Every structure is written in structure tokens, then in C-alpha cells.
Amino acid sequence: MRIIALDVGTKNIGMAVCDPLGITAQSLETIRRKGDLEADVGKVAAAAKTYGAETIVVGLPKNMNGSEGPSCEMAKSFAAEIEKVLPTPIVFWDERLTSRVAEQAMIGADVSRKKRKQKVDALAAILILQNYLDYLKRGEPR
């Protein structure tokens, strides 16, 4: 079982993939967005095909009160573009605070500010995917 997770932002898209057993998440490339939606979707589609992804998990950056703002709409819109080119099922996952947790983890590891800025999106995607994998293992209703 291979699953890819995305942390969709305005400047970058962090990507992560799980191992074939669906136990751990590892980072993939971070897509630097340059205003070419078709190219961004193409890179995600290429990764999904390369890894044989059975599911794509897209992080939804909900507000702290659970409501959905413009960032959620952007993530949903990006997912809709992926659905146009891939038959792979898409799952939305609440990603509140993943970027913050990723940032704090890197600060705790004494990662320089410059490197944190480069890695935060990939680490956020890893957290989204690992949270989803842990949910699948627990078998809880969503």
C-alpha cells in the first residue's frame, strides 16, 4: 500500500510517501510553485505513478475553530485538478498545526532558519501522512 501526502501552499507543495507496508512516512521533493498549475499537478501525478500510489492525502489547513478558509479552498481546488489527471482516490486530512509542529521540531533540533524554511513543507507533509497512517492502524471511525 503506497500513499502520498501533500501539504499544499501558495509557494510550495510538500510531498511525502509511505513505505510499501504503510508504516512510516518519508519526504519526497518539495515543489516550488511558479504559477504553473499544470506543471505542479504534473509533478504530483508523476510521483503518484512512480510510487504506485493507491491514495493521495491532501492536508486541509482548517482554522482552529474547525472552519474552512481560503487555504482549504486552495487545497481542495488543487485536489480537483489532480482528479482530472489521475484516477487515484483523494482523501482530505485535517492538518491544523502541522507546519507549526514541523517548525518547532526543527528549532528543537537546532536547524538553521534558512534550512527550516526549505524543509518545513516536506516535514509538514510527513506529519500529515504519518497522522493518517496512524489513524488507519487504529481503525477508528473518522
Image: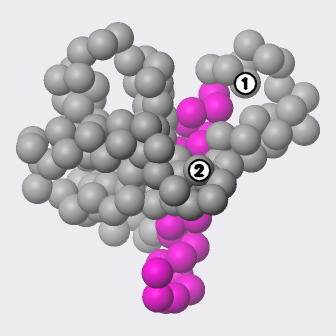
Q: Which residue is mark 1?
A: 116
Distance, label 2 to label 1, CA atoms, is 23 Å
Residue 97 in the image: state x and y as whole percent: 67, 49
The residue lying at 60 percent from left, 43 percent from top is 124
Numbered badge on residue 63: 2
Residue 18 falls inside the magenta stretch: no
Asked where in the image residue 71 lies, by quadrant, the reply is: top left
Give the residue type at disc 2: Asn
Numbered badge on residue 72: none
State left or right for residue 120 relative to residue 5.
right
On-image quarter of the N terminus: bottom left
Give above or below for 84 relative to 130: above
Give above or below for 109 relative to 23: above
The crowding category of the residue bearing disc 2, from other C-alpha atoms within 10 Å (few below 14, some 14 to 19, many at least 20), is some
Contact (CB < 8 A) between labels 2 and 1? no
Q: Main secondary structure of the magenta part?
A: helix
- Could you say which is closer to the camera, residue 65 or residue 43? 65
Residue 138 falls inside the magenta stretch: yes
Residue 34 in the image: state x and y as whole percent: 35, 11
- Could you say which is closer to the camera, residue 61 or residue 51? 61
Give the residue type at disc 1: Arg
Number of marks in the rendered image: 2
Asked where in the image residue 81 lies, by quadrant, the reply is: top left
The residue lying at 86 percent from left, 32 percent from top is 107
Residue 69 in the image: state x and y as whole percent: 47, 44
State left or right for residue 139 relative to residue 107.
left
State left or right for residue 109 relative to residue 20.
right
The residue lying at 20 percent from left, 45 percent from top is 80
The crowding category of the residue bearing disc 1, from other C-alpha atoms within 10 Å (few below 14, some 14 to 19, many at least 20), is some
Q: Which residues are magenta?
A: 119-142
Q: From where the camera sits, is residue 24 visible?
A: no
